[in-house]
Amino acid sequence: MTYCIVSTHDHSELVPVTGRWRWQGFFKERGIALQDVLRYERERASSREHLPRTFVLLEEREPVGMVTLAENDLEIRPNLNPWLADLYVAEPFRGRGHGLRLVQGLEAKAREKGIDRLWLFTTGAAKLYAKAGWIAVETVTRQGDAMTIMNREF
Ligand SMILES: CC(C)(COP(=O)(O)OP(=O)(O)OC[C@H]1O[C@@H](n2cnc3c(N)ncnc32)[C@H](O)[C@@H]1OP(=O)(O)O)[C@@H](O)C(=O)NCCC(=O)NCCS
């Protein structure tokens, strides 16, 4: 298999794909409309700001998952940055190592940008990140959900 990681900043044709995934994975259950997420996705992809950047994993040129490098992701910890955010693998492609590939791909992109420390929070996938070398540093509760904050230094 050939794998490649590209950003939606350079490949705007992938914006409808990542927008739909972001909605499906993180916004739909909160009652937020797909159209709003797609508009936000387009704005973020075309931004000239350094961050955020969304990266897509292509398997033989087919998009299978995404992850975002964001300046901030958790409003109760504004002093921590930048963050690995919104890791998502399309359902038919799960369980084949793409989640880990995306985490490691994002780390490589961060290093290219001179970043040597990343943060993330997760409610259920701490084990996956621990496999990639991330360390749990804190458990916090937000809107009734227990979340683990994790850290990775290169
Ligand atoms: C979580 C998600 C990205 C994992 O993607 P994936 O491609 O299936 O992950 P991988 O195949 O790389 O799994 C790597 C390892 O992590 C484990 N793992 C995967 N998802 C996990 C989860 N949700 N919780 C705990 N461990 C998990 C796998 O069992 C695997 O371990 P193994 O090699 O011992 O079997 C995917 O299930 C998804 O998109 N879920 C919906 C969105 C989401 O919850 N994202 C995480 C936000 S923090």
Image: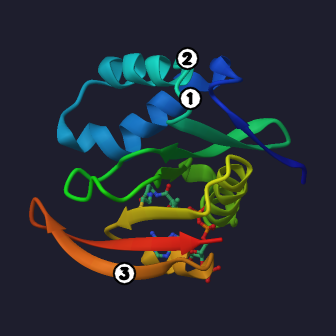
User: Which label is found at residue 137?
Assistant: 3
The Cα atoms of the two marked residues, 1 and 2, are separated by 15 Å
**x then y, percent, for residue 147:** 26, 70
Q: Quadrant of the N terminus?
A: bottom right
**x then y, percent, for residue 47:** 52, 19
Please name the amino acid that badge 2 sits on: Ser
The Cα atoms of the two marked residues, 1 and 3, are separated by 33 Å
- Identify the mark nearer the N-term, 1 or 2: 1
Q: Quadrant of the C terminus?
A: bottom right
Q: Residue at coordinates 48% horizontally, 81% vertically from top-left? A: 135
Q: Nearer the viewer, mark 1 or mark 2?
A: 2
Quadrant of residue 12 in the image?
top right
Q: Residue at coordinates 66% horizontally, 40% vertically from top-left? A: 56
- Tag 2 secondary structure: helix
Dots 2, 3 in contact, CB < 8 A: no
The Cα atoms of the two marked residues, 2 and 3, are separated by 33 Å
- Tag 1 secondary structure: helix
Along the viewing direction, whichever of 93 and 33 lies nearer the viewer: 33
Q: Residue at coordinates 48% horizontally, 18% vertically from top-left? A: 42
Q: Write down the residue under mark 2.
A: 46
Residue 117 appears in the rendering: yes
Q: Is 142 displayed left or right of 104 in the figure?
A: left
Please name the amino acid that badge 3 sits on: Val
Q: Write down the residue under mark 1.
A: 17
